[in-house]
Amino acid sequence: MTRPGRERGWPGPGLLGLPALALLVAATGSTVDDWAERLAREIPDPEDVVVVESSRGIAATLHPEASRAAVEVLEAGGNAIDAAAAAWLVLSVVTPNQTGLAGGGHIAYYDAATGQTYFVDAAQRAPMAAHPALFLDEDGEPLPTSEIRARGLAVGVPGIIRGWDVALKRWGTRYFDDLARRAIELAEGGWEVDRELSLRIHQTRESLDAHAREIYMPEGRPLEPGELLVQENKARTLRLIAEGGSEAFYQGEIAEAVARHVQSLGGVLTAEDFHRFNVTVDPPRWVRYGEYQVATHPNIPGGNTFAVLLGLLEPFGIGQYEPRSVERYHLLLEATRLASQESGEYFGGPEFVDHPWQATLSQEFLEDRRSLIRMDARMEEVEPADAWAYQVGRPYRTRGHHPKYDETTEGTVVTDRDDEGTDHLTVVDAYGNVVAATTSLGVGWVGGHMVPEFGFMLNVRGAYFDTRPGGVHEIRPGKRPRRSMTPTLVFLDREPVLTVGSPSPGPMQHAQVLLNMLEHGMDPARAIAEPRVAPNGAWERGVPPDVLEALRELGHPMDDEWSDRGAVPVLRRVGNLWQGASDPRRDGVAMAVGPVPGEDR
């Protein structure tokens, strides 16, 4: 079905939604003009979501060029890690608003040969010159968020190039010199701007610095869909990485240029911070949901939130309720409110803060927290539980547990549109290897800084630390900030059967897609298209009006207007075949490796 305004694959007219408008006003100080409706996202119908099938490999990303690049690598004999890296390199060119060379992220990988699952933590780290009072003014008060970003204090050491470097060297069969070719071609030769990128340029046009405006607003106005975007400086940077590997990014002129630019803004990042940077490769944290085993990231608040959310919901059996019922939405909202509390309270950088994760996944903890949920009313404001009371043993770092700062941390960036600077992709190959990766600039275009002569935007992940010292999320040298990203792999009888993941806001978005499939038996198309909700009152078009009103009567602060919530690429195994689908909310596309001659698929 084709709606008016959907020619050339662009979503048609719609409402931008209050959260997106809030970001726009905060970033630009301007009001909505015609572009907001003309370029707005839409909530898809199931028939808008294309599902592909293959036994030889599938890539599901949030841009067709990235999916195409991944499939070409698979068809040429590369494996899932190779294809995912190639897709991400293309995404750094065609979705620079969502991810980029200065980004960080998390790569979940299932290795079919060994049956092992790994998580590569490639999050940005704070510079070594960072200290807990970095975001305070001379009077000891928090700097405004805008000033933290303007001074370059929010720029963390980029991690994702090293993350793909480690993944490729450990599990891949190719390297940057081969995998970056398509990304370089698109950056150097140009490509036609799509609706999504044009929307982001419009939203952040007043925040972009002169270097970024020269690229994305070459005639003093935001590029429109169909106009050619050429990124010669980014092509040069990609070529340096292709020729010199990750060392070219972390040891040479790129690192020096980033450090020089950040310091010119007033930041403390140095080339030495690049030289000493590395990632970690960690085992997953496992949680059961019915007959399934779910692998989440062990180091990040989002991973714990996702695991606790599933643990809280499982006994309710939400499959007994209609997908768009008051009861189901109510349970999702209440469980998410509870699941996110302890993660924010206790789960700071794991190298600096003890995580009581055994406690938050214990049955005693889950039962106590679940008992707070009522079906006839929204919970009153509830405090996080004392997780250490459920934990075996005591904190074993000498400083012990850092209590959360008990005053408002004005200046801390916790926006409703964190997904604007984040991307997700997932790939499976013919050998059964599976990748799910979430990468982020952290609303990077609101910061607006582009590295001169190298053509990529800087991240603002450092602004996810608390502005005041003393809590689990205070900034410290080399520390990783809070993150809600959590690429997720789902297993049945020790075999991977599902992947989900999404740009923020929060893991609740792809948890809803997962539950649509596990609890309601939906196929990937309907699971992705089903309207989502969020505890802050956001909801998507398609939630019935009477259900919204009933939720308000229960006490939920549902917004007056709808807004889109995340974007979820999915892989699902059915028998010997894999199915793949991506999210039209971000113009995502899944593509499959075709059958060899003589095969049905």
Image: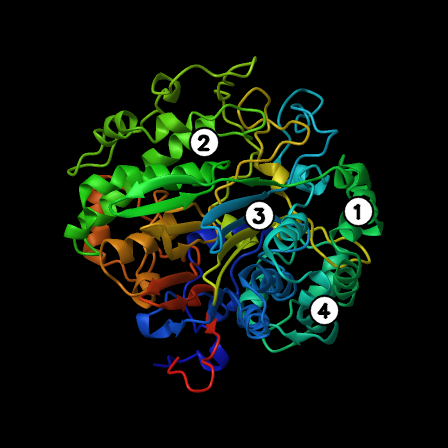
Other-residue count near label 2 (Cα within 10 Å), few / some / many at <14 / 14–19 / ≥20: many
Q: Amino acid at mark 1?
A: Ala
- Residue at mark 1 to residue at mark 2: CA–CA distance: 32 Å
Residue linked to disc 4: 184
491 w.r.t. 584: above or below: above
What is the C-alpha distance between the residues marked 3 and 4?
21 Å
Badge 3 is on which residue?
Answer: 105
Q: Which residue is mark 2?
A: 344
First in sequence, mark 3 or 4: give its number.
3
Amino acid type at image mark 3 = Gly
Label 2 amino acid? Answer: Gly
Q: Is residue 224 left or right of residue 427?
A: right
How far apart, in angstroms, are the residues tagged by discs 1 and 3?
A: 19 Å
Labels 1 and 3 touching (C-beta < 8 A): no
Which amino acid does the dot numbered 4 rest on?
Answer: Ile
Q: Residue at x 60, y 62 (%)?
A: 82
* Earlier-in-chain disc, 4 versus 1: 4
Q: Residues within 10 Å of mark 1 (few under 14, many from 20)?
A: many
Q: Which of pointers 2 and 3 lies earlier in the amino acid sequence?
A: 3
Residue drawn at x 53%, y 28% is 409
Q: Nearer the viewer, mark 1 or mark 2?
A: 1
| Image x and y of residue 571, in percent | 40, 62
